Image (cartoon, grey):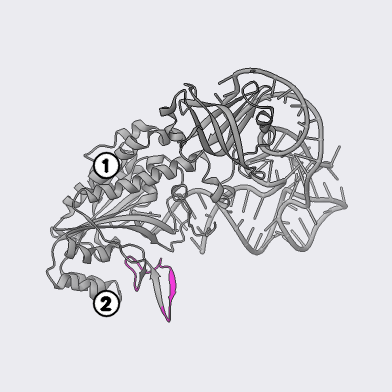
Amino acid sequence: MAEYILAKHISKYLDKEITLKGWVYNIRKSGKIWFLIFRDGTEFIQCVVLKNDVSEEIFELKNTLTQESSLAITGTVQEAPRQEAGYELLVKNIEVIHVAEEYPIALKDHGVDFLMDNRHLWLRSRLPYAIMKIRAEVEKACRDFFDERDFTLVDSPMFTPNAAEGSTTLFEAKYFDRKAYLTQSGQLYSEAAIMALNRTYCFGPCFRAEKSKTRRHLTEFWMIEPEMAFFDIFDDMDLAEEFVEYLVQRALKNCRRELEILDRDITKLKAIQRPFPRITYDEALELLTKKGFDIKFGDDLGAPHETAIAEEYNKPVMIWRWPAESKAFYMKRDPEDEKYVLGVDMIAPEGHGEIIGGSQREEDINVLLERIEKEDLPKEDFEWFLDIRRYGSVPHSGFGLGLERTVGWICGTHHVRECIPWPRTMGRLKP
RNA sequence: UCCGGAGUGGCUCAACGGUAGAGCGGGUGGCUGUUAACCACUAGGUUGUAGGUUCGAUUCCUAUCUCCGGAGCCA
């Protein structure tokens, strides 16, 4: 009886008889030989069926098996240097489990809308498969990085009573007889948590009802947000660059096969080593002016600006020390010049946009109150947040990294919607 | 919300205002090393919707819906 194995382990079974269980990816027929490209969710393997090696009944399956039919296939493993997997299976027997109906996704071009409508099937294709593998590795790397550095995972709530960022982009939910909002960020909760646990991170979905229709936006996306007591903006930036370097190198180390499937230029990823360039907002303005942009102090940097800056480097760029008026109320003012806040954005190379936003947080309750009043935020909703500054306030910092944008950069995908299994955008809630 | 682009067999796309075509997928047949295999034959269409101009509209006009790309905002 042949041993049932996962296809990814095939190299350990050279010349042995094994059984694989999975699905038909493609069939190439010839007269007395046919090739079945098989997938089981761990690897793609070419299986060779020779007329003289199998029964008439098995050989004739070439006419009845359809794309995505499920089967158990038994045969001998042999080397096949021309195959991506390096091995192929010489078939002895095929047990058909289910013959699939005509499969809508062909191995040819399809439009994005069609593929997204069929996301539940599209996930079976090679590119989504590779991206999901890499996403899982990056998520694991996120946890490992912080777990190995004395951080405690403290999850934040999804239902919140108020906004964390601006109030314009909240999803409203019915919460019994009241209103609740889906969280946009766990940061405010993390600020409370570090006073209990010193260094924490939260990792989960965030929801923003932004009516954005660009390749960098989802309404539901995942964010990992570390928060650290006694960290200033420089400690924050040091950690951010160490973190991003770690994520990229982990993907390179553990997802080489998947990056190959995606045809990713890995020399670009290999170059992602510390230190990353750091420029201030003022320096960014100077650079942009030199490049011909019409931009003045106080203007926020848009996507074209970010791209222009990013293309100057082959590494992520950190832009820090931003004009206060363009940034959130909780960011700490620069003690040397009140016009600025100690915030930082990290821009990924190759046009993948902002992957990190972070800052040193304002620890002075009076400054915070002043900002809350000036921005006309509902003070009573922030009382608990102000308590953090009433009882042993300390300098602290943190940042948030967008998972899909980071995965999109590592994979070299065109759009972040490919980097989440079930994308939610302004116009898409299905499947 | 604003600006631009696109809606044609299951899918991806053609078609000067004049008989709607091709490739893939499906079906049938052929081929012993194929790499999105190849070759031959075959079925498959109220051109997003509603109006209008015209002898005649896939093509021009108006409205509307959907999708895509971008802007703003952000991760």
Task: Specify whether residue A233 is in view.
Answer: yes
Q: Position of residue B6 (x, y in %)?
A: 63, 47
Q: Which mark is residue A246?
A: 1
Q: Position of residue A219 (x, y in %)?
A: 44, 59
Of residue A163 and residue A146, the one placed in the foreground of this image is A146
Q: Position of residue A201 (x, y in %)?
A: 26, 57
Q: Residue at x 66, y 45 (%)?
A: A101
Q: Which chain does the numbered disc 2 sit on?
A: A
Q: Position of residue A345 (x, y in %)?
A: 28, 51
Q: How many marks?
A: 2
**Label located before the other in sequence (1 or 2):** 1
Give the magenta part as a residue range: A161-178
Distance between the Cα atoms at labels 1 and 2? Answer: 39 Å
Of residue A2 and residue A309, the one placed in the foreground of this image is A2
Of residue B38 and residue A58, the one placed in the foreground of this image is A58
Asked if residue A39 lies left or right of residue A291, the reply is right
Q: Which residue is mark 2?
A: A379
Q: Is residue A74 above or below residue A132?
A: above
Residue A171 is one of the magenta-drawn residues: yes
Q: Are marks 1 and 2 in contact (CB under 8 Å)?
A: no
Asked if residue B22 lies left or right of residue A260, the reply is right
Q: Secondary structure at mark 1?
A: helix
Residue A9 is one of the magenta-drawn residues: no
- Answer with the quarter of the image where residue B72 lies: bottom left
Magenta: predominant secondary structure element?
A: loop
Q: Is residue A16 above or below residue A223?
A: above
Q: Secondary structure at mark 2?
A: helix
Of residue A234 and residue A206, the one placed in the foreground of this image is A206
Quadrant of the rendering where the C terminus of chain A is positioned: bottom right
Please identify, in this view, whether the residue under mark 1 or under mark 2 is nearer the observer: 1
